[in-house]
């Protein structure tokens, strides 16, 4: 749900007004008619209040096919920066990579995802980080439906092999699903790896090709 700031539409940024007005996604849609946005963020750390998003990468999946042309990548200028996280994502505070402001990143990201279904590995973290970015800019939280490939992967395994207490990492999925780890720990690379994992997991779950969006949510 959105904060009270959104009660008067005249206060909305135009792009966010469009996002709200168009947000009607039927959960009865066949999976083949649903646009999934698989995304990942690279951040300065894991504290949603103190840390910041440095980059966002995303790719769309429609009819269980990755549309590499329909992709998204940006880098965000942040005053808050932690040098210890550089060894993970390789992003420097200064460099030759073109960066945008948080406000610009929000507009571009919302325009890309529209009202479609967001997918990520342990996606709750990424959603929380985006929501904090929105709130810092006096906007409400995302209202897109979300899917976690970690949870879906557990569901796709035979009940005999399910380990409900195991917190499957993206590396675990790569190993079990035979996915090559290309550009690991970059937002775009991890988004693509997650999209491939999502494809394989959905193929397992939708053997009769009759699942609807509500069956995954």
Image (tube, rainbow, N blue to C red):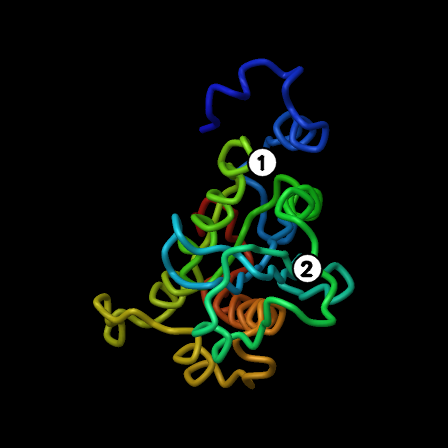
Question: Viewer-proximal residue, 50 or 71?
Answer: 50
> Which of 75 and 215 lies nearest the eye of the viewer?
75
Q: Is residue 78 above or below residue 157?
A: above
Say which of 56 and 116 sits in front.
Answer: 56
* Residue 152 at x, y percent in the picture: 40, 62
* Residue 25: image tag: 1
Q: Nearer the viewer, mark 2 or mark 1?
A: 2
Q: Residue at x 45, y 52 (%)?
A: 216
| Relative vertical location of residue 59 with respect to residue 200 in this rendering, above or below | above
- Answer few, some or many: residues within 10 Å of disc 2's Cα (few below 14, many 20 plus, some between 14 and 19): many
Query: Residue 65, image x and y in percent?
Result: 67, 65
In whole angstroms, how far apart are the C-alphas of marks 2 and 1?
A: 26 Å
Q: Are marks 2 and 1 in contact (CB under 8 Å)?
A: no
Label 1 environment density (alpha carbons within 10 Å; few <14, some 14–19, many ≥20) = some
Q: Is residue 174 left or right of residue 69?
A: left
Total numbered badges shown on the rendered structure: 2
- Left or right of residue 31: residue 123: left
Q: Position of residue 118 (x, y in %)?
A: 54, 51
Q: Which residue is mark 2?
A: 74
What SS does tag 2 mark?
A: strand
Residue at the spot x=67%, y=66% of the render?
A: 66
The quadrant of the image that shows the N terminus is top left
* Residue appearing at x 54%, y 79% in the figure: 184
Which of marks 1 and 2 precedes in the sequence? 1
């Amino acid at each position: 749900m959105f904060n009270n700031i959104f009660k008067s539409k005249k206060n909305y940024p135009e792009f966010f007004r469009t996002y709200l007005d168009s947000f009607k996604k039927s959960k009865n849609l066949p999976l083949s008619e649903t646009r999934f946005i698989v995304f990942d963020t690279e951040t300065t750390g894991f504290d949603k209040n103190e840390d910041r998003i440095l980059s966002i990468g995303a790719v769309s999946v429609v009819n269980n096919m990755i549309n590499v042309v329909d992709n998204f990548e940006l880098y965000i200028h942040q005053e808050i920066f932690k040098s210890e996280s550089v060894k993970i994502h390789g992003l420097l505070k200064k460099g030759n990579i073109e960066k945008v402001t948080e406000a610009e990143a929000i507009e571009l990201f919302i325009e890309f995802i529209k009202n479609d279904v967001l997918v990520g590995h342990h996606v709750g973290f990424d959603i929380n980080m985006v929501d904090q970015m929105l709130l810092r800019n006096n906007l409400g939280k995302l209202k897109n439906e979300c899917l976690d490939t970690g949870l879906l992967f557990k569901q796709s395994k035979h009940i005999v092999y399910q380990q409900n207490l195991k917190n499957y990492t993206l590396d675990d999925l790569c190993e079990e699903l035979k996915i090559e780890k290309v550009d690991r720990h970059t937002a775009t690379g991890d988004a693509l790896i997650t999209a491939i994992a999502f494809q394989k997991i959905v193929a397992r779950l939708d053997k009769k090709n009759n699942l609807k969006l509500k069956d995954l949510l």
